[in-house]
Image (cartoon, rainbow, N blue to C red):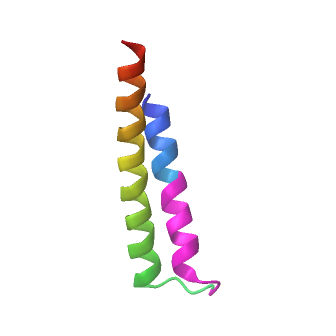
Amino acid sequence: MKVRAVSWTVAMAYTGFLLGGNGSPSFDSLSISEALLGALTGILLAIMFIIRAKRRHT
């Protein structure tokens, strides 16, 4: 289950980083904040799916 949490966090952080750049190759504070927001979203999604899997399993 930890693998799922890590993979969701990394995937969403990368997605946030890509969307924050809007096609520009520059690395600025907007890119960092979008990556952090993506990572937060990934953590929340991972928690949601882990809770759902535990509920279904029992």
The quadrant of the picture occupied by the C terminus is top left
Q: Which residue is outermost to the top?
A: 58
23 w.r.t. 8: above or below? below
Residue 1 horizontal/vertical position (percent): 44, 28
Instruction: Name the residue rendered at 43%, 39% in the picture.
Output: 5
Instruction: Name the residue rendered at 37%, 40% in the picture.
Output: 48
Instruction: Name the residue rendered at 34%, 30% in the picture.
Output: 51
Q: Is residue 21 left or right of residue 31?
A: right
23 w.r.t. 58: above or below? below
Q: Is residue 58 left or right of residue 12?
A: left
20 w.r.t. 55: above or below? below
Q: State the extent of the magenta-drawn residues as a range.
A: 11-24
Total marks in image: 0
Instruction: Name the residue rendered at 56%, 64% in the picture.
Output: 15
Q: Nearer the viewer, residue 24 or 41?
A: 41
Residue 29 horizontal/vertical position (percent): 40, 83
Whether 2 is among the magenta residues is no
Majority secondary structure of magenta residues:
helix
Q: Nearer the viewer, residue 40 or 51?
A: 51
Residue 27 horizontal/vertical position (percent): 52, 82
